Amino acid sequence: MRRSPPRTPEELNTGLWMVPYADLMSNVMILFLALFVQSYALHGAALDSAMSQVSSEMAPEDAAARRRLKESKVAVELEKAVKGLTLDEMGVRVTRRYIHLTLPAPVLFAGGSDSLTDEGRRALEPLAKILGTVPNPVLVGGHTDDRPILGGRHKTNWELSAARAFAVIEFLRSTGLPANRFRARGYGEFRPVGDNATPEGRRRNRRIELSLVREADGA
């Protein structure tokens, strides 16, 4: 059997340097662990307080993200409800501050009246259920065309638009939604979205707008 030639002293000592190096690294690690334990023993409360503060600062961000997600779901559900009703001039629009829902007044009220029709109640019922899934405030704005009112309970379009806004709020409240979530606003003919010189424009201007107030992100 052939034997390998004997190693020289240089070859035998090639890896010996790793032994004291490993011992040195072990000692350094033990030293740092001892220093950490001592530091935590002296300042443990401060470290815990700092970690708690970081956690508390992250929590609002998580809450804001969940809130935005919930509001997005509400907008999607409102859009589905609008499509299910298949009513003209109904639509959902989302901005940084609001989720707007436009309802055609002729569907909700008879001409010159502030009493909800049966069709109007059926249109509002699914919307009330969706609004009940979030606590956000809701602004209810009434709008009319510019034709003057001849007779009836109300002397001006301003009065009629406000009365219709209150009627919508009263119905939503009757479904179990808290009354303090709602604010009524009557705009009369002063915020048109169509041309009052045309029948189509006047029809677009006669509307109720529900605006779900989105919670601010601290901006």
Image: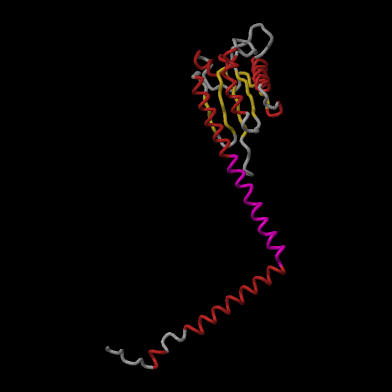
Nearer to the camera, 136 or 49: 49
Residue displayed at 63% across by 49% down:
59
Q: Is residue 51 in the magenta section?
A: yes
Nearer to the camera, 34 or 63: 34
The percent coordinates of residue 46 (x first, y second) are 71, 63
Residue interval drawn in magenta: 43-67
Q: Quadrant of the C terminus?
A: top right
Left or right of residue 10, residue 134 in this image:
right
Main SS of the magenta part reads helix
The percent coordinates of residue 16 (x first, y second) are 45, 86
Q: Quadrant of the N terminus?
A: bottom left
Nearer to the camera, 120 or 208: 120
Q: Is residue 4 in the magenta section?
A: no
- Check the image and tell me how it is coloured: secondary structure
Q: Residue lying at the far left in this picture: please name it.
A: 1
Q: Is residue 205 positioned above or below 78 on the image?
A: above
Examine the image and state in which quarter residue 38 appears.
bottom right
